[in-house]
Image (cartoon, rainbow, N blue to C red):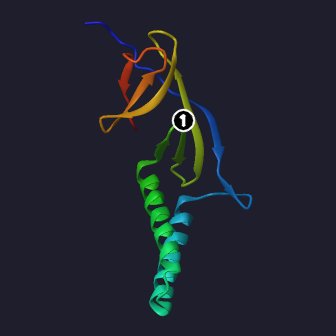
Amino acid sequence: MKNDKIPKLERILEKPIKVFGKQLKIIRVILIAGAGILYTGMLFNETHSYTPLVFLILLLILLGISAFLMFKRILYFGKYNLECSSAGDVYLTQLQGICPKCKGSLKIVKKDNTKKILCDKNDTHIWNLKEK
């Protein structure tokens, strides 16, 4: 059996997401989204207008994405990723690697409900993505 080298992905971009000059913390986003959900829910109950429902839906989406990021620690969006450190800081990152077989560029793709590392030169060079 042939030994295949498992490719390593490195961060070529690691940019902290800042709001008003401060590092964005995931717990702050969750707390603000939760408070916003309570507020817009009460506002809808009082006014019976559909405008608060739009904000309620957006805040629910934000809360879901934030909670998922907090538990998974990394979300893949095309060539960019959102990562959450153990301290709760949120970063925009980009992962890149070199194919050990043909020296092509590697990218992360979703195939058959699993994330895989794929070479851009040769589609047969494919590995399962191991998340920590």
- Image quarter where the N terminus lies is top left
- Image quarter where the C terminus lies is top left
| Residue at position x 46%, y 53% in the image | 69
How many residues crowd around disc 1 within 10 Å: few (fewer than 14), some, or many (20 or more)? few
| Residue at position x 46%, y 89% in the image | 48
Q: Which residue is mark 1?
A: 79
| Residue at position x 47%, y 85% in the image | 44
User: Residue furthest toward the top?
Assistant: 2
Instruction: Depth check: give the residue in front, 11 or 103.
Output: 103
Q: Position of residue 32 (x, y in %)?
A: 55, 71
Task: Classify 118 as above or below 1.
Answer: below
Quadrant assignment, res 18: bottom right
Element type at marker 1? loop
User: Residue furthest toward the bottom?
Assistant: 46
Q: Position of residue 73 (x, y in %)?
A: 46, 48
User: Residue furthest toward the left?
Assistant: 1
| Residue at position x 74%, y 58% in the image | 21
Q: Give the left or right position of residue 13, taking residue 29 as reference.
A: right
Q: Position of residue 30 (x, y in %)?
A: 50, 66
Three-letter amino acid code at the position of disc 1: Lys
Task: Classify 65 as above or below 81.
Answer: below
Task: Classify 21 as above or below 131.
Answer: below
Instruction: Depth check: give the residue in front, 99 or 46.
Output: 46
Q: Position of residue 15 (x, y in %)?
A: 65, 43
